[in-house]
Image (cartoon, helix red, strand yellow):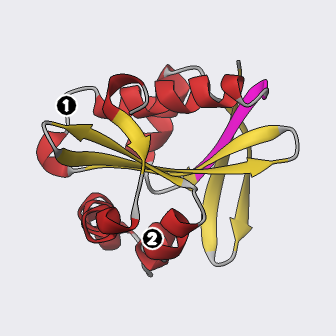
Amino acid sequence: MTPKGIRPAVPADTARVTAIVDAAYRPYLQRMSRNPAPLDDDYGARIAEGLTYVLEEDGEILGVLVLETHAGHLLLDNIAVDPAHHGRGLGKRLLAFTEAEARRRGYGTVELFTNEVMVENIALYRRLGYQETGRRHDRGYDRVYFRKAL
């Protein structure tokens, strides 16, 4: 088990990971003309690739991370917290883990992106020191890109 109850996901976690992502992103459907990209991801494959981490408390998975290694930075591809547990700082714990993991892997930056309609996420990333690096239309989505120097 890694710090603060965050561990690599295993195949048995696939259904719960998928359910958390669905619950976390489904509310955005009312703001978007198509599924948020994380709803269409294959979490069984992401887990098999070793890219997925879960935040677990008392044996229950409450949050999910998907981290990708890229040249020069760690990409936070997805972060999701079970909406029933919002307001407990779990997202901040997952972000802190991401930053620590980037440092552990020898990276000086974390990058991420979100959809421009996910204004709550944009505000959170800014509060936590992420700097906006651009906005682009990418694969049918209007994305906002962020970077944080560690």
Q: Under tag 2, what secondary structure?
A: helix
Q: Under tag 1, what secondary structure?
A: loop
Q: State the residue in front, 122 or 69.
A: 69
Residue 60 inside the magenta-drawn segment: no
Q: Which mark is residue 55?
A: none
The answer to whether any part of residue 103 appears in the image is yes
* Amino acid at pointer 1: Gly
Q: Give x and y (percent) for residue 26.
A: 28, 68
Tell me how far mark 1 sits from mark 2, CA to CA.
25 Å
Quadrant the C terminus occupies = top right
- Please give left or right for residue 6 compared with residue 126 in the image: left
The answer to whether any part of residue 41 appears in the image is no
Judge the density around disc 1: few (<14), some (14-19), many (≥20) Cα neighbours within 10 Å: few
Quadrant of the rendered image containing residue 91: top left
Magenta segment, which residues? 107-113
- Name the residue located 34 percent from the left edge and 24 percent from the top edge: 4
Q: State the residue in front, 142 or 77.
A: 77
Q: Main secondary structure of the magenta part?
A: strand
Judge the density around disc 2: few (<14), some (14-19), many (≥20) Cα neighbours within 10 Å: many
79 shown above or below 36: above
1 vs 2, front mark: 2
Marked residue nearer the N-terminal end (1 or 2) = 2
Q: Which mark is residue 87?
A: 1
* Amino acid at pointer 2: Tyr
Residue wearing tag 2 = 43
- Please give left or right for residue 47 compared with residue 50 in the image: left
Q: Are marks 1 and 2 in contact (CB under 8 Å)?
A: no
Q: Give x and y (percent) for residue 38.
A: 46, 67
